[in-house]
């Protein structure tokens, strides 16, 4: 049975008008400006940029305001906007070794060139609500210290010198792009990393945690975590050379993982890698753990059936826009589908009733 | 990579400096220096995106990290020089100012433009970077060994 339904335009219009009013809230309270969101809810902005897969803090701030702080809705808005942009090209791979680090820590080496730099971190705070923030107040200037010049090399470089860790040899294979071709299995590491960096933070965190609890355990240490600005450089065809187009803030995590060797590889430490837009170390560490778990095949490890080892499971369920799209569509009108289900159940009940009647008669 | 002479090194440096300047800054410096030169659009300001790439493990095979909004434009001065701009963000006015400065740097006013626009931008960029680095330096951990477990 086919039932065409029309109507509801006025209800929809009224619903959207009410949404706008509710979004604004009490008009006696000052309206939130985009610069306020951009500057004071920076980590929310960073998450929307990372999972929206578009670096633009002003747009992310707008999306957060429009979505009333629902970050997945904001990510949806950014993803939709992204598709309207013409693609000018691709950048040269960013050099995270040359990052201007706000933060740089290692859980494996106490004394390392460049030092342990805590940066503006929540770590070591007491996680007690600070009621001073409830009142408007002046913030004192952060202390400064003389800057010691010198490189801040990646931690894995020291281990590389002894060949104790697998190397990540330079390679210029053009990477696949899941925004251009549908995500298909098998997915190589480049494709997995692209999917993971835009993956839902909660989903990635849960999977990473599962590897720590034993589902595909790979004994990860945070070899290094760094947050800071890197320069983005792109080749300009009409000029014939590359120029810097600006800087972006990134969070990078390199894990050092225990590895006893396999049929194809000698015993040495292996690596997991996380790189995420903005300041987002929970996501970067999670990404590195999941990346390492997904590398079981190329390292000749056993597949133990852990969810974090299952590339198809991870990549097909990590995108919160795909997930929410499919999940939430079931709340939209399904009157026709449901009508046929209803007919079916009635028919089955009728048949079952007739059989019972017959059995009783016999 | 930097051992070979790069004939474009100077221009690359100033285009990068112009791209990284804070919003509105290039335009403000340009307007304080001179009346804007007469120009025609070779390419009117246009907003698009660039795919940023990273490398697996920091040094390995490239992968696509995510896009960034970019504004680009190109101008031709009445004196013939062509200026280009590719800058991050959705900033048409900034792209226009950057392209104009790029064109001016190729003409007779290069010296003036360098002193009045590029040099202040350079100073400001260095100051911003050192201020941030000094705050990071203040959070550097100094370890003191309290007791060793071996004795």
Image: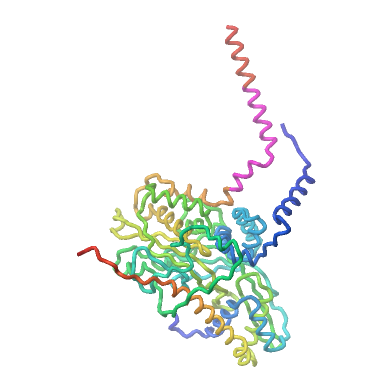
Which quadrant is home to the C terminus of chain B? bottom left
Q: Residue A240 in the image: state x and y as whole percent.
A: 56, 78
Q: Is residue A14 visible?
A: yes
SS majority, magenta: helix
Q: Residue B144 in the image: state x and y as whole percent.
A: 32, 70
Q: Residue at x 44, y 71 (%)?
A: B139
Camera-nearest residue between A176 and A306: A306
Tell me if residue A246 comes above or below residue A48 in the rendering.
Answer: below
Tell me if residue A36 comes above or below residue A294 in the rendering.
Answer: below
Answer with left or right where residue A152 lies relative to residue B43. left
Q: How is the image coloured?
A: rainbow
A347 falls in the magenta region:
yes
Q: Residue at x 58, y 77 (%)?
A: B20
Q: Is residue A173 visible?
A: no
Q: Residue at x 72, y 88 (%)?
A: B35
Number of callouts in the render? 0
A18 falls in the magenta region:
no
- Name the residue furthest top: A362
Camera-nearest residue between B91 and A311: B91
Tell me if residue A5 comes above or below residue A181 in the rendering.
Answer: above
Q: Which residues are magenta?
A: A324-348
Q: Residue A300 in the image: state x and y as whole percent.
A: 34, 53
- Name the residue furthest left: B151
Which quadrant is home to the N terminus of chain B? bottom left
Which quarter of the picture shows residue B112? bottom right
Q: Residue A282 in the image: state x and y as whole percent.
A: 47, 58
Camera-nearest residue between B147 and B91: B147
Tell me if residue A76 comes above or below residue A92 in the rendering.
Answer: above
Answer with left or right where residue A359 lies relative to residue A219. right
Answer with left or right where residue A336 lies relative to residue A114. right
């Amino acid at each position: 049975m086919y039932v065409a339904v029309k109507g509801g335009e006025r209800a929809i219009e009224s619903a959207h008008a009410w949404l706008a009013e509710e979004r604004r809230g009490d008009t006696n309270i000052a309206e939130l400006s985009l610069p306020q969101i951009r500057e004071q809810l920076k980590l929310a902005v960073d998450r929307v940029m990372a999972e929206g897969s578009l670096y633009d803090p002003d747009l992310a701030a707008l999306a957060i305001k429009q979505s009333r702080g629902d970050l997945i809705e904001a990510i949806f808005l950014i993803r939709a906007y992204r598709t309207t942009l013409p693609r000018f090209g691709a950048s040269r791979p960013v050099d995270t070794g040359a990052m201007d680090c706000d933060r740089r820590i290692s859980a494996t080496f106490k004394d390392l060139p460049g030092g342990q730099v805590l940066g503006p971190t929540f770590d070591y705070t007491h996680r007690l609500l600070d009621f001073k923030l409830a009142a408007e107040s002046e913030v004192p200037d952060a202390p400064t210290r003389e800057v010691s010049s010198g490189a801040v090399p990646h931690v894995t470089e020291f281990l590389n010198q002894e060949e104790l860790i697998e190397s990540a040899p330079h390679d210029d294979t053009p990477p696949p792009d899941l925004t251009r071709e549908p995500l298909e299995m098998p997915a190589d590491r480049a494709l997995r990393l692209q999917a993971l960096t835009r993956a839902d933070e909660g989903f990635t965190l849960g999977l990473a945690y599962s590897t720590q609890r034993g589902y595909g355990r790979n004994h990860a240490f945070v070899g290094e975590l760094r947050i800071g600005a890197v320069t983005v450089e792109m080749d300009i065809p009409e000029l014939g050379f590359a120029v810097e187009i600006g800087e972006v803030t990134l969070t990078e995590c390199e894990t050092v993982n225990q590895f006893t060797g396999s049929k194809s590889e000698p015993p040495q430490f292996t690596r997991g890698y996380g790189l995420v837009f903005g300041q987002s170390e929970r996501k970067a560490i999670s990404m590195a753990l999941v990346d390492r778990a997904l590398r079981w095949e190329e390292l000749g490890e056993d597949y133990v059936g852990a969810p974090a080892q299952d590339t198809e499971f991870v990549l097909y369920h990590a995108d919160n826009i795909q997930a929410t799209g499919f999940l939430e569509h079931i709340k939209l009108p399904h009157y026709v589908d449901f009508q046929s289900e209803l007919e079916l159940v009635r028919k089955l009940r009728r048949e079952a009733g007739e059989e019972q009647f017959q059995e009783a008669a016999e | 990579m930097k051992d070979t002479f790069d004939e474009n090194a100077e221009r690359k440096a100033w285009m990068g400096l112009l791209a990284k300047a804070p919003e509105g800054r290039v335009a403000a410096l340009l307007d304080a220096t001179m009346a804007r030169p007469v120009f025609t659009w070779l390419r009117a300001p246009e907003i698009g995106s660039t795919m940023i790439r990273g490398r697996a493990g920091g040094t390995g095979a490239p992968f696509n990290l995510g896009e960034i909004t970019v504004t680009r434009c190109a101008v031709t001065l009445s004196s013939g020089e062509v200026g280009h701009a590719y800058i991050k963000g959705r900033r048409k006015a900034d792209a226009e100012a950057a392209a104009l400065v790029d064109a001016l740097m190729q003409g007779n006013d290069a010296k003036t433009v360098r002193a009045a626009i590029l040099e202040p931008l350079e100073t400001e960029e260095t100051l911003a970077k050192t201020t941030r680095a000094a705050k990071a330096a203040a959070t550097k951990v100094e370890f003191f060994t309290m007791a060793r477990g071996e004795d």
